[in-house]
Amino acid sequence: MFGRLLPKVINGGIAGIVGVTCVFPIDLTKTRLQNQQPGPNGQLLYRSLWDCFSKTYRNEGFLGMYRGSGVNLVLITPEKAIKLVGNDFLRYQLTDHSTGKLTLPREILCGAGAGLFQISVTTPMELIKIQLQDAGRSGQYTLQAGACTASKLTAMKIISSLLKEKGLTGLYQGCAATMLRDVTFSALYFPFFAHLNAMGKRRENSTEAVFYHTLLSGIIAGGTASLFVNPLDVVKTRLQTLEKGAGERSYTGIVDCFRKVYKYEGIKAFYKGGLCRILVIAPLFGIAQTVYYIGVGELLISLVTGTSD
């Protein structure tokens, strides 16, 4: 069993690291757009995706665009491994092996289960990442004369503060909102990807699709599912933001957040950062599924062990 899972874990880890490295600046932009609230006179710090991206780059530099990426790169390996391997494991368990078929309700259940498994890693990762990504917007960092100046905010400082104030449960603030987003996303994404991928041309002497079809399937399925769950992602981001900007509202829970966002900002607020999220998730999952299905992990293991399974 371990021999079968290890290459899949490696595939998931590599896929996550490559994907996150490629799209992280856009993910940072998404977080800041989702978190910003109108000022007393309705003014906004960022007017659009490009405005947010350019201001962040101008004020904080290239490395500022990767603020919070360290914790993501460390935890993305277990997160992606749990999601991709979990879905594969559940699909295998729920498939009718006499016919080789898996019904759509069971496919949805497998995806939802994979999303549920991953929140044990995703919730702390997202919580810490959001604080670091949003620092320049919320006031943790003071922007003066086009430069970012502040006491250094680090992942270890955030973790230490949360553990000291709230214990281990502090790292799981927003867990319910994270679960709602990730379970819904995975329940939509995995069945859609599987059906799209099954329609593609097969690799020679293989039952797997050619890499470019897997890439395209991951992009389409990831982009579609991410747009659908964007309102849930906005709520999760707001609930996990610990340091609010001056005059910004706080929320007591999921329902309170939905109610206040709708009341004060309107329905459009639930789609803040929607384009950014598509630009993040679509290529991230396209890359992840391609690496996963190409079998980089199997290749690496075969080179190390000298086998050619």
Image (cartoon, rainbow, N blue to C red):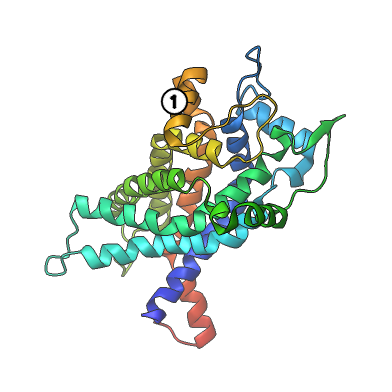
Q: Position of residue 19 (x, y in %)?
A: 55, 53
Please name the amino acid that badge 1 sits on: Arg
| Image quadrant occupied by the N terminus | bottom left
Quadrant of residue 57 within the rendered picture: top right
| Image quadrant occupied by the C terminus | bottom left
Which residue corresponds to the image point at 60% horizontal and 40% vertical from the top-left? 241
The extreme left residue here reads: 98
Q: Position of residue 238 (x, y in %)?
A: 55, 35
Which residue corresponds to the image point at 70% horizontal and 47% vertical from the top-left? 67
Q: Nearer the viewer, residue 133 or 217?
A: 133
Q: Position of residue 91 (x, y in %)?
A: 27, 62
Horizontal side of residue 286 vs 151, given as left or right: left
Horizontal side of residue 175 vs 134, given as left or right: left
Above or below residue 162? Residue 237 is above
Q: Is residue 84 visible?
A: yes
Can you identify the residue that label 1 sits on?
Answer: 259
